[in-house]
Each structure stands twice: as C-alpha cells, then as structure tokens.
C-alpha cells in the first residue's frame, strides 16, 4: 500500500529530492527520478545522459558493418538475407498502408516508413545503421549507456534515414527500435561481434609482423 494519500502528495514529496543524474542540482519533476530537463531528454532519447546521436557519430561503425553485411550477402548468408528482407517487407507494407508494428503509434510509424520508401531508402542501409549502433555500444559504451538507450537510438536514426522535418518524438523511436530489436537482436549482435573479431585479427597480424626479429 502506498505511503501517500494521493498523487499530489507523492508529487510534492518527490519534488523535494534532487535529480538522479550525477552532478545535477535541480529538483525532481513530478514523480520522475529526474529534473524537468533530464526527464524530457530521457523520454526523447532513452537516456537522461545524452540528447541525440548524429549520423557522423557512428560513420566508422556504419562502414565496418556495411562491409561485413555486403560481403555476407554476396556469400548467401541466410541471416543477412533475412535482415534485409525484414526491412524490405517493412517498407513494402508501409507503401501499401499496412502497419508492421503493433504499438500505440503503429499508424504513425507506418507513415514514416512510407516516407522512407518514397525517398528510396535502401533496406541494406537500414540494417547497417541498426548494426552500427549495436557496434557503437559495444566499442564505446559511454555513448550508448544501456539497452533502453540503444533501442531509442536505433529507432531515432532509422526514422531519420531520409529527410524528417518533424520534432523528435521518443515514443516513435521506442516503437521502431523495439520492433527491430525484437526481430533482429541476434543478427545485429553477430554483425557487431564479427567486426570486432576482424579488427582483433588484424591487430594480432600487425603485432606479429612488428615482433622483434632474431638473428
């Protein structure tokens, strides 16, 4: 049983506490664990610590992932082909007015993917973007803090794969990112792990080449 008589009492008590973000001296907003600013950022981007992830922030990871994806697609890798088919089907369904997600914002997500389809967005790019953000989290965990932040980041970047004039809306990013993660999690992690393993092998080869020589 709640120790508060009503929501107003709970709000008043919570607002006496400081925001949970380290170093923030503002009081909490309503019943959130964060101040008004960090609560807004958290709801938009999935983390109170960051605002948004720009395309330039993961361009190296994107190039690494699209290289692995392209190579394995040409080799007939069934997982890669499934991932590309997943996004192609999403774009095709949206163009026919069929929602692919089942959440509260399914119709809005469908309209956005119709926009992506009309702009000629390539499903391989959508897969590469998703994998690049997983790789970014693994290589630079300070940039994508946790699973929730990753889901929002995937959704946010996919929605902006073509010109998007609207304001950021966290629930849309969450619905898109969740749909991708629920269906492609294993594939995306495998792509990221493959890139990392390839880098480690290259580093090992360079170290061996530069090892001291004996006479």
Image (spheres, grey):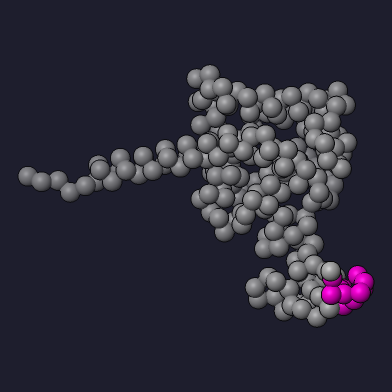
User: Closer to the camera, 103 or 121?
Assistant: 103
Q: Is residue 154 left or right of residue 194?
A: right
Quadrant position of the N terminus in the picture? bottom right
**x%, y% of residue 173?**
76, 46
- Residue located 47% across and 36% down the image: 194
Tell me where residue 19 sits by quadrant.
Answer: bottom right
| Residue that lies at the very extreme toward the front in this rendered image | 1
Of residue 37 and residue 98, the one placed in the foreground of this image is 98
Residue at image location 80% in from the left, 35% down from the top: 101
The image quarter containing residue 21 is bottom right
Counting the numbered discs, the total is 0
Q: Position of residue 183 (x, y in %)?
A: 67, 34
Does the segment drawn in magenta span residue 121?
no
Vertical order, 196 against 142 (above or below) = above
Q: Residue at 68% of width from left, 38% of height from top?
A: 182
Closer-to-camera residue (15/64): 15
Can residue 122 be seen from the camera position used here?
Answer: no
* Range shown magenta: 2-12
- In the rendered view, does 161 fall on the left or right side of 99? left
Seen at 58% across and 44% down, the residue is 134
Residue 121 appears in which quarter of the rendering? Answer: top right
Residue 141 x, y percent position in the rendering: 55, 55
């Amino acid at each position: 049983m709640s120790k508060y008589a009503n929501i107003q009492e709970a709000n008043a008590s919570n607002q006496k506490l400081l925001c949970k973000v380290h170093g923030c001296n503002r009081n909490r907003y309503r019943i959130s664990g964060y101040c008004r600013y960090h609560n807004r950022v958290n709801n938009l981007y999935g983390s109170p610590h960051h605002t948004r992830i720009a395309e330039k922030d993961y361009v190296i990871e994107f190039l690494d992932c699209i290289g692995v994806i392209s190579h394995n697609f040409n080799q007939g890798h069934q997982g890669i082909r499934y991932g590309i088919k997943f996004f192609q089907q999403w774009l095709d369904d949206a163009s026919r007015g069929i929602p692919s997600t089942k959440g509260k914002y399914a119709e809005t997500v469908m309209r956005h993917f119709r926009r992506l389809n009309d702009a000629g967005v390539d499903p391989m790019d959508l897969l590469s973007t998703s994998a690049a953000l997983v790789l970014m989290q693994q290589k630079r965990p300070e940039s994508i803090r946790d699973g929730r932040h990753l889901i929002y980041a995937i959704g946010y970047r996919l929605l902006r794969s073509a010109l998007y004039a609207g304001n950021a809306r966290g629930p849309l990013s969450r619905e898109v990112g969740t749909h991708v993660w629920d269906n492609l999690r294993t594939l995306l992690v495998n792509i990221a792990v493959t890139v990392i393993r390839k880098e480690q092998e290259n580093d090992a080869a360079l170290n061996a080449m530069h090892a001291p020589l004996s006479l």
